[in-house]
Image (tube, helix red, strand yellow):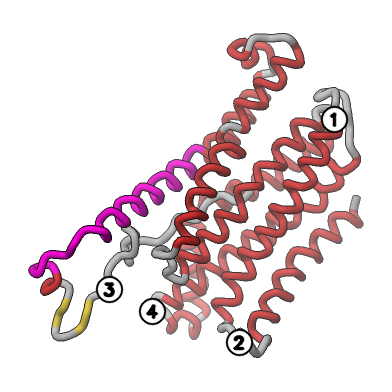
Amino acid sequence: MLIILAAGSVFFPGLFLLSKQCLKSIPALRWSEGDAVIVSARLVSSIQAVMASSAGYIIASSCKDIIEDQHWLTSTYIMFAVPYFMYDIYAMFMCYWYKLRVKGHEEAAAAPQHMRSALVSYLRREFLMVLHHVVMVTVCFPVSVFWRQGKGDYFQGIMFMAELSTPSVCLGKILIQYKQQHTLLHKVNGALMLITFFIFRVLLFPYLYYAYGRYASIPFHMVPLSVPWHCNLGAALLMAPQLYWFSLICRGALRLFRGTSRSQRPTPPGDKELQTTHGNTLPQPANGYNARSSEPELATH
C-alpha cells in the first residue's frame, strides 16, 4: 500500500515537472514559465482522467455481480490516485498565480506577502474545488479502501469513469486562456464538454441508483428508501458540486451561442465609432466572453 502511495506521489508531480521543463526547453516551443505551468497542469489532469476512466471501464466490465465481485485494480488505483488530489491543489494555485501575473500583476512576484495574499484569494475563489479535493483524500479514500470491505467495486468503477469529461474541460480552459474562443475547435470541444459532463457526472448518480434497483429488483423510485441513509447522503454531497459546475458550463455555452449570433450580425456604423477611442481599437469580447470575466475552474475529478 505504501509503495503504491509513494508511486503516485512521485508520478504526478514528476510528470508535471517533466512536462513544464519540456515546454520551456524544446527549441520549437520555448514557452514562458507561466504558459508551461498552465498547460502542464492541464496535461497532467487529462492523463490522470484517461488513466482513471480506463481503470473504471476495466473494473465495471469485469464485475458481473455488482455488489460482491471484486477487482484488484479498484483499491490499487484509488491508492495511486490519492496523491494526485494533493498535488492538484498546488498545481491549481500555480495556475492561478501565473494568471494574476498575466493580468498585469507582475509586481506580485517581487514580494512574498503578495504571494500570501494570492494564496488567500485563491482559497476563497476556489474554495469548492479545494474542499472537493480535501474530501476526496480525507473521506472518500478511507471509505473506498477500508469501509466498503471489498463490496461494490462495480460502482467504484463507474465513478472512476466520471473522469471522461476532464480532458475536454482542460482543453476548454487552455483555449480560453489563450483567447481561442472564436475557433471551431473551441466550439466542438465545448459541445463535447457539455455532453460528457452531463452524461458522466450528472446522470452518473441516477444511473447508480438504477443499477442497484435492477440488481435488487426494486423500482427506481424506491431505491433511495431501500439503501442506507449514509449512501444517500454521500451521493447527494458528491452530486451537488457536479450540478453547480454543470450550471457554469451551461452558462458558458449560452454566452458562446449568444456571442456567435451577435458576431454574425452586421455592425452599425455608429457602433464602429464607439469601438475606437483616440485611434485605438478597444478589445471586444470573443463569442460572448467578456474580457474582464474569468472562466470558472470546473471540476475535473
Vertical placement of 203 versus 247: above or below?
above
Say which label, 4 or 1, has the lower sequence index: 1
Which x, y percent locates residue 238? Answer: 60, 36
Please give the label number shown on residue 63.
Answer: 1
Q: Find numbered disc 4 in the image and state the secondary structure of the residue it sits on.
A: loop
Q: Is residue 84 left or right of residue 6?
A: left
Marks 4 and 1 sit apart, C-alpha to C-alpha, by 53 Å
CA separation, marks 3 and 2?
Answer: 27 Å
Q: Position of residue 234 (x, y in %)?
A: 64, 30
Residue, x 68% and y 63% (percent of image)? 44
Image: 256 above or below 17: above
Query: Who's the residue at 61% across and 39% down the image?
Result: 200
**Mark 2, secondary structure of its residue:** loop
Res. 30 mark: 2
Q: Which mark is residue 283?
A: 3
Tag 3: residue type? Pro
Magenta residues, start to end: 243-271
Residue bearing mark 4? 104
Nearest to viewer (mark 4 / mark 1): 1
The reply to whether the magenta stretch includes residue 262 is yes
Image point (76%, 53%), residue name: 51
Q: Identify residue type, mark 2.
A: Arg
* Residue type indicated by callout 4: Gly
Mark found first going from the N terminus, 3 or 2: 2
Callout 2 environment at 10 Å: few (<14), some (14 to 19), or many (20+)? Answer: some
- State left or right for residue 143 relative to residue 43: right
Residue 197 versus residue 86 in the image, above or below: above
Q: Amino acid at mark 1?
A: Cys
Residue 141 is inside the magenta segment: no
Query: Residue at horizontal 42%, vertical 69%?
Result: 179
Give the spatial CA distance, label 3 vs label 4: 16 Å
